Image (cartoon, grey):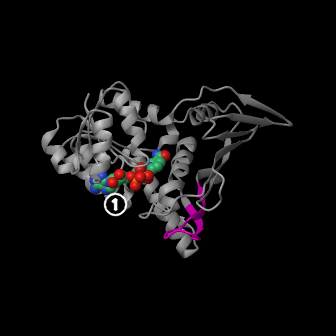
């Protein structure tokens, strides 16, 4: 198995470390040649400044695209055209129509296209999903997410809905095992060029809802969610991966082994390439998340709910 990586910035350096640890990394490419050189030398792999040059020179099976969102479509398109399996960081594309084009191309070329919705690989989400599926505490009625952190100003191409709330949009779809029919959002900006706080309500069938609160303003890093079921409230923290179940006046902690979600996410892509398992995040699901993010932004601009009819 031979894997390359495009983009070795703030987040991408983690992929480089893991891919090297797993012994599959053969080359990296970053538009910033200093970074490319630094990581190429650190992990003893070939390094490039341009994707074209890498495609000309390297033989490989799959690629990770960990560049800014606005560059995903062009890079992923070239890789898919070369019949490579592609993992694109979230959100898959800025425009959902570009995501549709990528998904079609991947299908035509019979390669995997997936997207970095990492919380699906968070062991805490796995446990909550199992509890919900088994209806251990009754029916899941409502989900609530809080993702708050003062963010550096380096993300210039998208606002908080596309950058941050998308994680919770995907997790809500995953836990409800459904797509929302309606989206309502309020959002605004205080410090950034694009929206930097947002509250999003996703409406699923049978009046089920997910409420997503995200902001880049408040100083404390918060990444929590709760699943309100008919017989208990299950709360968890994406960072500590702890899970607490509150029933009546008593609360119970569910023991769970902490693991690095990125390692599990990368392993799933590699296993799917080798056909050992299914790719967990399907390309159409990632396109849908972008459609929901588009609807949330539009809703916040128009002040009205946006109705969707997702596949
Ligand atoms: N899953 C997560 O939890 C998570 C967390 C952070 C970021 N991300 C995603 O990862 C992606 C990258 O984010 P980041 O914070 O690492 O950004 P960053 O700006 O720190 O790094 C991006 C890197 O890509 C390089 N680059 C830019 N254009 C390029 C091109 N055309 N070809 C090759 N290299 C190019 C830049 O030089 C830079 O080194 C984004 O899509 C972001 O949404 C995901």
Up-down relation of residue 37 to residue 309 (above or below): above
Element type at marker 1? helix
In the depicted view, which residue is nearer to us: 41 or 292? 41
217 to the left or right of 19: right
Residue visible at 53% across and 66% down? 306
Residue visible at 58% across and 68% down? 187
Up-down relation of residue 43 to residue 215 (above or below): above
How far across and down, in percent of the image, does residue 14 sit?
42, 39
Farthest residue to the bottom: give it: 302
In this figure, which residue is indicated by the disc labeled 1?
97
How far across and down, in percent of the image, does residue 235 sit?
70, 40
Up-down relation of residue 212 to residue 304 (above or below): above
For the stretch drawn in magenta, the main secondary structure is: strand
Q: Is residue 133 magenta?
A: no
Q: Which residues are magenta?
A: 183-203
Classed neighbour count for the residue bearing mark 1: other residues with Cα under 10 Å, few (<14), some (14–19), many (≥20): few
Q: Is residue 186 magenta?
A: yes
257 to the left or right of 118: right
Residue visible at 60% across and 40% down? 239
Quadrant hosting residue 248: top right
How far across and down, in percent of the image, does residue 104 sit?
27, 50
Q: Quadrant of the N terminus?
A: top left
Residue 222 can be seen in this image: yes
The CB of the residue at mark 1 lies under 8 Å from ligand 1: no
Residue 311 can be seen in this image: no
């Amino acid at each position: 198995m031979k894997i390359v990586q495009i983009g070795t910035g703030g987040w991408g350096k983690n992929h480089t470390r893991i891919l090297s640890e797993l012994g599959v990394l053969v080359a990296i490419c970053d538009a910033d040649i200093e970074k490319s050189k630094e990581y190429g030398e650190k992990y003893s792999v070939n390094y490039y400044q341009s994707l074209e040059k890498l495609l000309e020179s390297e033989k490989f099976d799959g690629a990770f695209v960990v560049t800014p969102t606005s560059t995903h479509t062009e890079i992923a398109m070239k890789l898919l055209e070369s019949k490579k399996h592609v993992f694109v960081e979230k959100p898959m594309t800025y425009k959902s129509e570009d995501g549709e084009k990528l998904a079609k191309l991947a299908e035509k070329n019979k390669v995997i296209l997936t997207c970095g919705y990492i919380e699906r690989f968070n062991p805490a989400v796995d446990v909550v999903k199992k509890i919900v599926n088994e209806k251990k505490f009754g029916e899941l009625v409502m989900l609530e997410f809080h993702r708050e952190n003062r963010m550096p100003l380096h993300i210039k191409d998208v606002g908080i809905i596309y950058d941050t709330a998308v994680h919770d949009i995907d997790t809500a779809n995953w836990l409800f095992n459904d797509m929302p029919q309606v989206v309502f959002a309020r959002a605004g900006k205080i410090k950034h060029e694009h929206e930097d706080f947002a509250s999003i309500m996703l409406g699923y069938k049978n009046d089920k809802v997910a409420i997503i609160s995200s902001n880049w303003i408040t100083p404390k890093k918060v990444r929590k969610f709760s699943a309100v079921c008919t017989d208990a409230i299950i709360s968890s923290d994406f960072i500590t991966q702890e899970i607490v179940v509150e029933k009546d006046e008593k609360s119970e902690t569910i023991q769970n082994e902490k693991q690095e979600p990125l390692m599990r996410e990368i392993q799933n892509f590699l296993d799917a390439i080798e056909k050992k398992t299914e790719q967990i995040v399907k390309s159409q699901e990632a396109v849908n998340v972008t459609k929901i993010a588009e609807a949330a932004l539009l809703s916040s601009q128009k002040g009205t709910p946006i109705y969707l009819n997702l596949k």
